Amino acid sequence: MHTRAASWLRHRLGRAVVLAYALALFLPGPGLWLRHPHPLPPAAHLTLHTAPLLLSMVLFSAGLQVPVRALGALLRHPKALLAGLVLHLAIPLAVVPFVAFLLRRTPDTDGGSGLLTAMILVVAMPVAAGATVWTDKGDGDQPTMVGLVLASTLLSPLTTPVLLATLSPLLSGGYAHTLAATGRLAGGGFALTAVVLPCTAGLLGALVLPARWLGRLATTVAPSAMAGSLVLTYVNASGALGSVLTRPRPLLFAAALAVAALVCLLSFVLGRVAAHLLRLEAATASSLTLACGMNNSSASAVLITASLPDKPHLLLPVLAYGLLQKTAANRIVTRLRPAPTAAGA
């Protein structure tokens, strides 16, 4: 039953995401309520933070479904893995200053620092677990992608604060101080409890549980995680879109879309160029390119909600990036799909 439910939802995931955005636009109230912490009776000193909890559930499910034993070959031939990790740090350092230079030429009084803050928080996040789905769809190198997701996630308590601190001088109007404070949160409890620990717990489950138990647990967790991902999308979108109908800001929406599109395009292009220079075979090149452009936008949205609750408009470019990276991923796996081997070859 759970397998059928997961399959049914997976095949309708695109339409379900669109529905979540529509609900956030026309019925944002429940999502706005879920964005705030709520006490847990009868222990009033304990609070429930919905968004981090949903993110943890999604990452636990991703770790649980990792083909851990397939990573041995990757460790014996780590070129693509090491290149992906280097690019994961290098691309933000190349893309964000270029985008900041362009934004300084706009009439925005703070040089687009709000939009730039959101983009920094996106590109500083680990590789999105959903990239493995696109790798599978495009017949890419799954062990390389899984290795990049896991390595970037486990290193995120170190890499995320470093990237935020390095890029914060590009900001003005108080955003540099805000990003520094966010970096302390990311390097403290957030990355560890909401990102690393759930993924590690799922990974350990995949390693130690007997195959029968693991199969049962995965078929139960997978549909719940997908449903949780949709609820998380709705909660994040409610924060960004909740005031659209009452206080429309078309210029902000256009700017958010333009900045997100530029950052997304440059990240994928640099990943594709690097794969070409490394002369990787088609399957590995596809995985490396996807890893360079697909960041965990859900994690960045949760971090913005937790650290900047008074700036919900910063979620707009994050949501735009989340949609654009999926569109770009679909094109990449179509173009870089390995050629089928001739029968009998």
Image (spheres, rainbow, N blue to C red):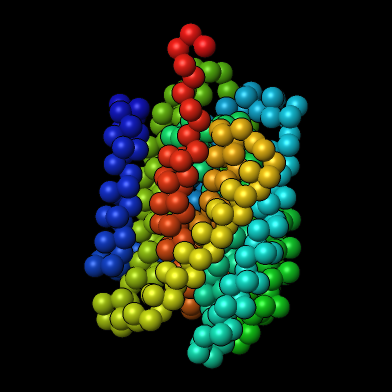
Q: Nearer the viewer, residue 183 or 56?
A: 183
Whether residue 182 is situated above or below residue 233 in the rendered picture? below
Q: Position of residue 235 (x, y in %)?
A: 38, 61
Q: Position of residue 327 (x, y in %)?
A: 41, 51
Farthest left residue? 26
Q: Residue at x 49, y 56 (%)?
A: 298
Q: Nearer the viewer, residue 41 or 48?
A: 48
Whether residue 258 is situated above or below residue 227 in the rendered picture? below
Q: Quadrant of the N terminus?
A: top left
Q: Position of residue 34 (x, y in %)?
A: 39, 63
Q: Position of residue 79 (x, y in %)?
A: 73, 37
In the rendered picture of this protein, how many numbered marks are placed on residues? 0
Q: Residue at x 67, y 78 (%)?
A: 170
Any part of residue 299 in sight: yes
Whether residue 260 is situated above or below residue 56 in the rendered picture? below
Residue 197 is drawn in which quadrant?
top right
Q: Nearer the viewer, residue 233 or 293?
A: 293
Any part of residue 302 in sight: no
Whether residue 115 is situated above or below residue 67 in the rendered picture? below
> Would residue 117 be found to the left or right of residue 167 on screen?
left
Q: Residue at x 67, y 64 (%)?
A: 94
Q: Residue at x 36, y 45 (%)?
A: 227
